[in-house]
Image: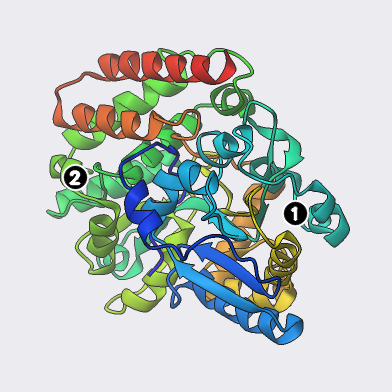
Amino acid sequence: MRIPTRGIGAVAALAATAALLTGCSGGPSSDPNTLKLWHFEGTDSDVGIAWERAIEIFEEETGATVEYEDKSFEQIRSTASQVLNSNEAPDVMESPKGNATAGLLASQGLLADITEAVEEYGWDDMLAPSLQTTAKYDENGIMGSGPWYGVPNYGEYVTVYYNKTAFDELGLAVPTTYEEFEAVLDAFVAAGQTPLAEAGAEYPLGQLFYQLALSQADRQFVNDYQLYENPVDWQGEALTYAAEKIAEYVDKGWISADSTGLKAEDMGVGFMSGEYPIMVSGSWWAGRVINEATTFEWDTFLFPGSELVPGSSGNIWVVPENAANKELAYEFIDITMRPEIQALIGNNGSIPVAADPADITDEKSAKLITDFNTIVENDGLAFYPDWPTPTFYDQLVGALQELVNGTLTPEQTLEQLGTEYDDGVADITG
């Protein structure tokens, strides 16, 4: 199973380092015919299936052996700085993307500058400019410019999953405006059902908050928030609207106050079991929903009333500076960009970045890919709310939990988050 935590920032120096190092084989590969690979995708997940095939092709074509180590998302997220600065570094690794993760590692000199390989293999020609943003980092670890440090081979975005069966039972149509969306939420409450699956103990609530802010924002807001082009007004229109809406969602019963104790897995299971008719979350859930939501008909639609959407390239392949076999790493990355592997990604519920549309035969996957391509063409990818600083993920989760619990007002929530955001950005930019 893929751990559905795309967009989580924060590479922190945590005590889990020892546990991760204990699970590593001794020292980097000195064998020039061995590729040491780390990723955190389940082998039966959509991306995992594609990468298993990529490993088979790599071994067949190169004669080299892949030494794959199954790491959890949290192991890689929380201990990367320590492991990559040791002789335990793999040759190629899946990494979260953004300033707080890949950018931090790049600024610390722990990731290899792979610009020459990108140009040699033509990966830059395969990726739309907005997808390249999370692959490049400057000397301060700020994304969007500078050398290439990673390569994405799938994309992702936040969308709205809905239970078509439940909609039909209440005679509800897919909303095309935000006002219609709220009317749908009210209709489910009137029928005695909490409409939105939500999780306040992890990333989902923060993504809903950010999506609501984006509905009132423009590209300059995103550039200010994510790239620090100008100070962010935390009492401004977009963020005030989002905070007040979250409070309204609780007051009107659109989300449960109990969601503060729920994790992303609880949210997903709640939707897939039919407990909740709507889930606002990432495209990364699609593979599981296809396989597990078998008691009702379902589909997706883009969040109405917003041209900007939380999303980006997927997590990226990075090559550690201490990697023993960089050339093998580049060969493996290149295989994951081939049409065969891209089609596997697309037909198993994810969004390939370089697939031939004719190769995508799964109807649900084709719909997700079409919507994603529309967002990319409209320059609508707005990244994720926790990306700006290494500590902002935990700060965002905590503040929004208090907002839902009613221990902070919307204004107090924004005041707290604004202070934490500004302090974190100042640490990065000096």
Residue type at the position of mark 1: Leu
Residue 156, located in which quarter of the rendered image? bottom right
Q: Which mark is residue 106?
A: none
Display colour scheme: rainbow
Mark 1 to mark 2 CA distance (whole Å): 37 Å
Front one among 226 and 145: 145
Tell me what residue is drawn at x 37 percent, y 51 percent: 74
Residue type at the position of mark 2: Ser
Whether residue 411 is visible here, answered yes or no, is yes
Labels 1 and 2: the sequence-earlier one: 1
* Quarter of the image that includes the C terminus: top right
Residue 289, located in which quarter of the rendered image? bottom left
Q: Which residue is mark 1?
A: 127
Toward the bottom, the furthest residue is 60
Front one among 171 and 60: 60
Tell me what residue is drawn at x 67 percent, y 82 percent: 59
Relative side of 372 to 394, left or right: right
Q: Are marks 1 and 2 in contact (CB under 8 Å)?
A: no
Q: Which residue is mark 2?
A: 259
Please, what secondary structure does the residue beneath circle 1 have?
Answer: loop
Please, what secondary structure does the residue beneath circle 2 have?
Answer: helix
| Residue 318: % across, % down | 63, 53
Tell me what residue is drawn at x 46 percent, y 60 percent: 284
Relative side of 135 to 224, left or right: right
343 is higher (above) or lower (below) than 83: below
